[in-house]
Amino acid sequence: MANKVVTGVRFVKKNRIFHLQIQQGQLLPRGAINESTVEWVPIDDFKITDPDVCDGVDYHSLSHQERGIDLDEISTLDGQASVVTGLRLRVLSGRLNLITTKQ
């Protein structure tokens, strides 16, 4: 199914790892959401001890010096209407930042 947008976000702990889990649904005309399509996207099942999983790529380890998380407000700078189509975390100056993809 195409035309999906982010309808919710939550932190989920699985295998001692915190994940950002996205809820998505089909976008209808005039910004409505098809409620019958709303679902939580499954989280990948991996452990930090798996051989192909790398710190700094697949996950980020918090330390005493680098343990901050910035959960900023999501808005558009130009005042244009937009929808969020994706989310991820990145490390910036030792802190985790929430990054969005918008359309």
Image (tube, rainbow, N blue to C red):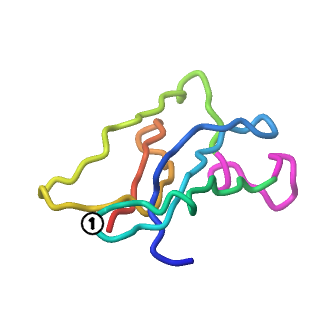
**Which is more toward the observer, 79 or 72?**
79
In depth, the one of 74 and 99 nearer the eye is: 74
Direction from residue 39 to residue 103 in the image, left or right: left
On screen, 38 above or below 16? Answer: below
**Residue plotted at (47% across, 63% down):** 34
Nearer to us in this view, 100 or 8:
8
Q: Estimate the x, y position of residue 20 in percent, counting from the top left.
A: 58, 45
**Which structural element holds mark 1?**
helix
Residue 59 placement, left or right of 67: right
Relative to residue 27, is residue 79 drawn left or right?
left
The quarter in which the C terminus is drawn is bottom left
Q: Which residue is drawn at 51% across and 78% down?
A: 2
* Marker count (numbered): 1
Q: Which residue is tagged 1?
A: 30
- Does residue 75 belong to the magenta stretch? no
56 in the magenta segment: yes
Please, which residue is most extreme toward the left here? 78
Q: Where does the image place residue 74, in percent across and percent down from the top left? A: 31, 45
Q: Quadrant of residue 36?
A: bottom right
Quadrant assignment for the N terminus: bottom right
* 4 lies above or below 39: below
For disc 1, the neighbor class at 10 Å (few under 14, some 14 to 19, many from 20) is few
Question: Disc 1 marks which amino acid?
Answer: Arg
Residues in magenta, as a range: 46-59
Which residue lies at the image location 42% right of the left edge and 60% below the top edge?
A: 33
Residue drawn at (31%, 62%) of the image: 31
Q: Please, what is the dominant secondary structure of the magenta stretch? A: loop
Whether residue 58 is situated above or below residue 30 in the rendered picture: above
Residue 78, by quadrant, is bottom left
Front residue of 92 and 76: 76
Residue 73 x/y as whole percent: 31, 39
65 lies left or right of 56: left
